[in-house]
Amino acid sequence: MVDTVSRPDSKGIRAQYRNGAGRRVHNGELTGPQKKTGSERKRWEETVVAKSLTRLPERGGPEAFTTISDEQVNRLYTPADLAGFDYERDLGFPGEYPFTRGVHPTMYRSRYWTMRMFAGFGSAEDTNARFRYLLEHGETGLSTAFDFPTLYGVDADDPIALGEFGKVGVGVSSLADMEVLFDGIPIDQVTTSMTINGPAAIVWAFYIAAAENRGIPRSALGGTTQNDILKEYIAQNTFIFPPEPSMRLVVDTIEFATKEMPKWNPVSISGYHIREAGSTAVQELAFTLADGLTYVQWCVDRGMDVDDFAPRLSYFFNAHNDFFEEIAKYRAARRIWARELKERFGAKNDRSLWLRFHTQTAGCSLTAQQPEINIVRTTIQALAGVLGGTQSLHTNSMDEALALPSDKAVRIALRTQQIIAEESGVTNTVDPLGGSYFVEAFTNEMERQCYDYFDRIEEYGGVIPAIKAHFFQSEIARASYAYQGEIDEGRKTMVGVNKYVIEEPVEIPILEMDPKGEEKQRAKMARLRAERDQERWGAALEKVRQTAMGNENIMPALIEAAHAYATLGEISNVLKSVFGVQQFSNVV
Amino acid sequence: MPTHAEETEGTADVKLSPRHSTIETLVGRLLEGDRGAASRLMTVVENRQTGYRETLRLVTKHTGKAHIIGVTGSPGAGKSTLVNELIKHYRGLGKTVGVVAIDPTSALSGGALLGDRVRMLGFTSDPGVFIRSMASRGQLGGLAAATVDVARILDALGRDIIIIETVGVGQDEISIAGLADTTLLVEVPGMGDDVQALKAGVLEVADVLVINKADHEGANRLANYIKTTMRLLPHPEGVWLPPIVKTVASEAVGIDELADAIEKHRTYLVERELLEKDRKERLRVEVLDRTRDLILKRLMRNLESSGKLDQLLDDLILHKTDPATVSHELADGIES
Amino acid sequence: MVAKSPQKQEQTERKIRVLIAKPGLDGHDRGAKIIARALRDAGMEVIYTGLHQTPEMIAEAALQEDVDAVGLSILSGAHMALFPRIIGELHRRGLDDVLVYAGGIIPDNDIPAIKEMGIAGVFGPGTTMEETVEFVRSHVTPRGVGEEE
C-alpha cells in the first residue's frame, strides 16, 4: 500500500504559491491599481507614518507584533499585499469552488452551526443525565468524552486502570455501558459525536449494537467517530496498534460507513490535539491536512471511489487566542482541501471538496487563575470559529483548567454560542471578513507555509514514515517549548498568569464524582462476565481474530462481538495479539 | 572546592541520608545482588566522589565474568530497538542483563536528556534487567573511564551480559566501542552518504556489523559497500573477520543470527586466548588515560589555586613568552 | 561567559539527576516534555520515562538511575489513587531521600493530602519553567557521598 502525500499534477499550483520573493509577498507582479497602492503605501510610510512615529512610537519593534504562533504581522495591509490575487480563483462564491468563503451558499442565514458540547464523566448513568440536561438547554448534538481506560481499549477492572475510571470522561467497557449511556435519548434524531481513536471501531460497534437492541437500524444513525489515528501518533498518544494495522481499521470503518451508514462521519480529521500539544497554527493546518490526504490515499488504494467516501470525511480544528490567524487557518484549509481533492484525486462531486469542520476553543489557553476570565477568552475564540465558517462548535467551560466542568459552567459556555449566533449579528452575512486585505494576505501565507510542510513530509516518503522518524513530534515539541519560554519571560501575555496577576482564592464549584464509581463499575463488570452467553462470546472473539488476520472488513465481526457482550479490553487484546502493540515515542 | 581529596584514602563514610552506609557495606550489598546499592555505587564511580577508589578496589576481584557488548552507530539506526531485542533474547536464555545507555550532554547547558529509550520498552518490572543512563559530559568528563567503571559495578552485581549503548558522538563513540569484548556497529540503509555513515575509525573497532532495517531499500547495496571497504582494511590470515548480520529489529528479525555472531566472536576470543589479551590492552589504554587525566587535573588545580595560570596568560598575551615554552616548563614541573 | 567556566563547573559540580515520570493513563505529555527540556537547559541530567508508567516502573527507574528527584506529571485525575502507591514503592526500595514533586491538573482540595504523603511540591497550570527548576535546585538533598576526588 502506498503512503504518500505526493501530488503528481500539483507542481503548477505549488509554483503559483512559491514565486514570491519575500516571505510576505504572495506572488506575481504588481499591476495597475495595485502598483499605484504600492507606491502610495511607500509615500505614506515615509511621510505620515514616519512623522507620527516621532511623536508616538510603536509599542516595540517588529517582534512585538507577532501572532501567538510567532508569525510577523505588518503595520498595515493594502491591495499591494495581494499581488496576483484573483477573486474567482482564490475566493469564489460561498458554496462554490474553491470554497474559501464557506461550503454552503447561505451559511448561518439558513442554519446556525451545531452547538455540540463535549461531555462525559463518571459512569454511563452520570453522563446520560448530563446529556439529557444539555438537550433540555438547547444543545443540538451530543458529543461524548471517554475516560482514559476506554481511550486505550482497557477495561475498567484492569489493574493498569486503577484510579482512572470516569475521571476525564465516561467509562465504557462494553455494550452494557453503551446501552445505559444513551438510554432514553432519541439517537435516530440527535447526532452523536464520539471522541475515540485507538479502539474507535470497537466503541462504534458498541454504539451500533446498542441502537440495534432498541430497534433502530444502523442506517438511521447519524454522528461522528473521531477515529483519526494519525494525529494520535503525531500528538495525542491514544493509539494502541502500530500505524499500518490501525490504518486498516480506519479504512474498514470508512468503507463500512460508506456502504451501510450514510449519515455517519467515520473520521473526524483532527488538528485540535496537534494544537493542544503545542503546535503552531500552520503546523496544525499542515499536519492535519496531510493526515486527511493520507486517509483519502489509503481508501483510493483499497479501490474505493473518492466521491463515494470523501463527502463523509470531516475535520476538527482548534480555535486559539489569535483571532485573525485562526480565521485565516480555516479559510486556507477549505481552499487547500478542495484543490487537492479536485486536482490530485479527481473528485467530481462538490461534496467531496467540502472541508466541513467542527471547532473547539483552545483548552490549553484556559487559565486556572481567575477562571472567570476564561469565559471572555472562549468568546473570542468561538467568534473566530464562526467567522471562519465552522459547521459545529464546542465552547470550553471556564473551570476546565481545574477540573471537569460543572453544570453551570457548561451552561454559560453554551450561552456564549447562543449570544454569538443570535445577538451579535455576525451571522447575518456570509464570510463577513472575506476581502479584508489582512485576512486574505494571511490566508495566502498560511497556505504557502502549509505547502512547505507538505514538501517536508514528502521528503520522508509520507505521513507514516514521517511519524516513524518523529518528524511531527519534534516539530511540535520545539514549538511548544519556544512558546512556554515566551510566556515565562513575558514576551507573550497570558492574562492572570504573567500579567494582571492577583492573589485570590479560586471559587469555582467543582464537579464532585461518586467516589465509589470505580468499585461499582468493577462489580458490574464481574456480573457481566459471569452472566453472558459464554459460547456466543467465545465464538465472536474467535471470529474477530480470524477477520483481523485476513482482509475482510472487520466491522461485522466487531458488531457481533459487541452483541455477545465481549468487553472492550477483551476485543482489544485479541486485536493486539494479531496486530501488535505500538510503543510510545519519547521524543522530548 | 575539594583539595587533594584523592589523597585522603580510607573508608569513606557515605551519607546516604537516611540510608547511612559505608562503601564497604554498599559493596557487600552489591555482591548480594542489591540493586539499590549497585545504583548508588554507580553514582559514586561516575562522579568520582569520595570512596570511588575504594569502591573499585573492593569490586575488582568480583569482575571479569560478564560478556561486555558495545553497541554503536548513527542516531536513528534503531540501536535501542536492537538492544531491546537482544535483552529479550538473553532473558529468554535465563541470563541477566545490564545496560549502560549513553546520551550526549548539551554543550550549551551542561545538562542532558537521557532518552531512556531502552527502559521505555518495558523491562522495568524484570529484576533481571538493570538499565543505567549516563550523560557524555564532554571531553573532560572522563566518559570512557566512567563507563567502564559503571560496567564494572554491573559485572560485580552478577550480570551475565552487559550492553553499552552509545549514540554516535564521533571520537567518544570510538573510545566507548573500545571498552567492549564484542562491539556491534549498527548501520541502516538510506541514511544518506554511505561513506559518511562509516566514519573513519569506527569500522576498525567493529567485531560484528549489523545492517538494521534490512527490509529497507538499499540494504544489499550497503552490505556490498561495507564488504568492499572491509577488504581495503589490513586483514592478516586467521584474524577475526567481522561478519555482516542483517536485522529488522522492530520485527525481531535476525536477532538469533546476531546473538549467534556475538557468541561466535566470544568463542573466538576465548579459544585464541584473546579475551585476556584484549582486556590487557584495554587496561593499558585505560590506565594511561586515567593517569593523564589525573596529572592534568592536579596540574590545573595547582595552577589555578596559585594564580600562576593567570600570570602565565598575562605573559603570553604580552608576548613575553610563547605557548611552547610555557608547556615545556609546566611538564618539567611535573617531572620534578 | 569565559570559555573555561563550563569546564570548571563540569569538574566540580555534581549534576542533579531528575526522573520525569508519567503515571496514569493520560497521554498528555506536553507539560512533562517542556519540564524535561527546561531542567536540561538548567544543566541537569533528565531521564524521561515516557507514558503509562506503573508505580513499580517509576520507583524501579528512580532506583536504577539513582536520581535526586522524581517529578510526577499527571493529568488524568487518578493522582489520589496513584501517588500513595508510587510513594509506597519508593519507600519499599529505601528511596526515602529522593525529592518527589508533582505537576499537572491537581485540584487545590487534594493538595494537603498530597503533601501529607511526602510529595514536597505541587505545581499547577501556569507554573513557569523557572519556578520548577528553582524548586528542584533548592530542594534536592545531594546524594550523600561527599566530594569529588
Image (cartoon, coloured by chain):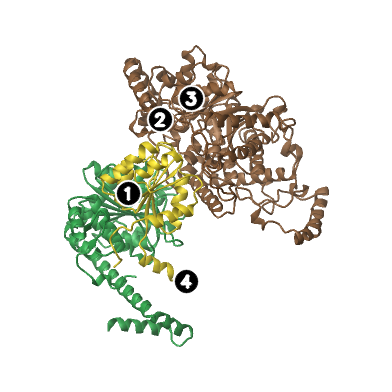
Which callout, 3 or 2, points at the residue further toward the start of the chain? 3
The residue at which mark 1 appears reads as C62
The residue at which mark 2 appears reads as A165
Q: Which mark is nearer the camera, 4 or 3?
A: 3
Q: Amino acid at mark 1?
A: Ala
The residue at which mark 4 appears reads as C2
User: Is residue A84 something that shows in the picture?
Assistant: yes
Q: Quadrant of residue B155?
A: bottom left
> What color was chain B assigned in the picture?
green
Residues tagged by mark 1 and mark 4 found on one chain of the structure: yes
Q: Secondary structure at mark 1?
A: helix
Instruction: Say which of A82 and A30 sits in front.
Output: A82
Q: Which chain is yellow?
A: C
Q: Amino acid at mark 4?
A: Val
What's the CA distance linking mark 3 and mark 2?
A: 13 Å
Q: Secondary structure at mark 3?
A: helix
Taking the view exactly as shown, the residue that stands out farthest to the top is A215
The residue at which mark 3 appears reads as A127
Taking the view exactly as shown, the residue that stands out farthest to the bottom is B320
Relative to A121, is C59 on the left or the right?
A: left
> Is the residue marked by circle 4 packed among few (<14), some (14-19), or many (20+) residues within 10 Å?
few
Residue A120 % position (x, y): 49, 28
Q: Which chain is brown?
A: A
Q: Is residue A115 above or below residue A5?
A: above
What's the CA distance linking mark 4 and mark 3?
A: 62 Å
Q: Secondary structure at mark 4?
A: loop
Q: How many numbered circles does the render carry?
A: 4
- Which chain is mark 4 on? C
- Which chain is mark 3 on? A
Marks 1 and 3: in contact by CB < 8 Å? no
What's the CA distance linking mark 3 and mark 1?
A: 39 Å
> Is the residue marked by circle 1 packed among few (<14), some (14-19), or many (20+) residues within 10 Å?
many
